Amino acid sequence: MNIPRSSHPRIVIIGGGFGGISLAKKLGKREVQVVLLDKNNYHTFQPLLYQVSTGGLEPDSIAYPLRKVLIGYDNFFFRLAEVTEILPEKKTLHTTIGELTYDYLVIATGSKTNFFGNTELQEHAMAMKSIPQSLNLRSLILENFEQALLTDDYHEREALMNFVIVGGGPTGVELAGALAEIKKGILPKDYPDLDTRRAQINLVQGGDRLLDAMSEQASKKAADFLEKLGVQVWKNVRVTGYDGKTVTTQNDLSFNTATLVWAAGVMGATIKGLEAKKLIAAGNRLNVNEFNQVDGHPEIFAIGDIACMQNREYPMGHPMMAQPAIQQGRNVGENLIRLLANKPLKPFIYRDKGSMATVGRNKAVCDLKQIRFQGVFAWFVWMFVHLFFLIGFRNRVVVFVNWVYNYIRFDREARLIIRPYKRDYDQFKN
């Protein structure tokens, strides 16, 4: 890897997400050697992936070079690599570019899509956890309408214009709202020779309400917003399979569709070497103590989605969102500094700053600690918060300008098929 030897302790961080960057910044100017490993050379602002998928933003506006995040910090090294195995007894990592030893290790690998063991869904459904996956989904959505123009088969055309989103959390709700706005304001202009009124957006939720991690007030309002936009919301419906053409459910309900987006769950992105059953908690996450140390390995820490810190308030661990990751990154950074100074560690205390989700133009729901509100003001708050947490001044400006333009023109300029997503459309022919 060509990492120079140093008299300073080596702290290796796996993952350049919210938690990894927060931790690296905390350690950047300390007398430690920090090595950040990630399979991508950029940080992804995941809350806005759905806007890339629906043509509202280009991917470079929500990505930021990892090397640039900590530019100018001494003793900081980034390597483009994927960690394949952890050897705790040797304090060594196996990666795609070689081996690396560490004094302290922080696992911040985040999460990946959870298909709950359903291989058919995993093979045919579309996920939206990364920029490449979002670009695939964008291409598929546009290709479906291009294909709908070419067919004279009614059932094939219906399937091509039928979208099914599984999962009523923030990702599913926001994607459904964006697609509904595209159907209303963009498709009639782009495809005047196609009856785009026949396009359907179906949001399928296994539970009895949307946004079940938020208040009932927010849940009900989000459902009302979506239904007014023309989204068909299906509650208490569990999807059991999708063969690339037909979605099956436990409720004897089925959908013929060329696009199934799976947003029904995530699980921790674990690494070989720490996969013993005693280390894995619910959601395939690593059990950690109140200092984010992995059970049985005081020199290994885990933060963010991959970490499960169980306590009375959070018996299943903290929410798999950005804020816990950011806060845990800062706390672990401070604790590593304290550890090296032989000072007692500080337990992690999560400060819940609330939850929010946007449903579309002038429509959002916000649950803050002391207040809950919905509508236009919530939408402005949602935009401000997301702009604030975007990394990089350029990205903030680009996203803001795009939002203003899209709002005034009711348009989404990035509806481009840059890299076609290949699929077999013959299966929809009768």
Image (cartoon, grey):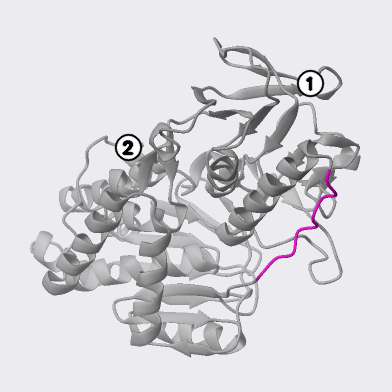
Residue 195 in view of the camera: no
What range of the chain is rendered magenta? Answer: 343-351
Q: Which mark, residue 259? A: none
Would you call the spot at circle 1 few (<14 residues within 10 Å), some (14-19), or many (20 or more)?
Answer: some
Q: Is residue 177 above or below residue 12?
A: below
Query: Nearer the N terminus, badge 2 or badge 1?
Result: 1
Helix, strand or loop at mark 1 = loop
Q: Which mark, residue 421? A: 2
Query: Which residue is painted at 80% across and 51% down in the image?
Result: 291
Total labels: the figure holds: 2
> Does residue 3 appear left or right of residue 313 in this picture?
left
Frontmost residue, 223 versus 402 = 402
| Between marks 2 and 1 in the image, the one whose residue lies nearer the viewer | 1
Frontmost residue, 418 versus 95 = 95
What residue type is disc 2 on? Tyr
Query: Which residue is painted at 60% across and 78% down in the image?
Result: 214
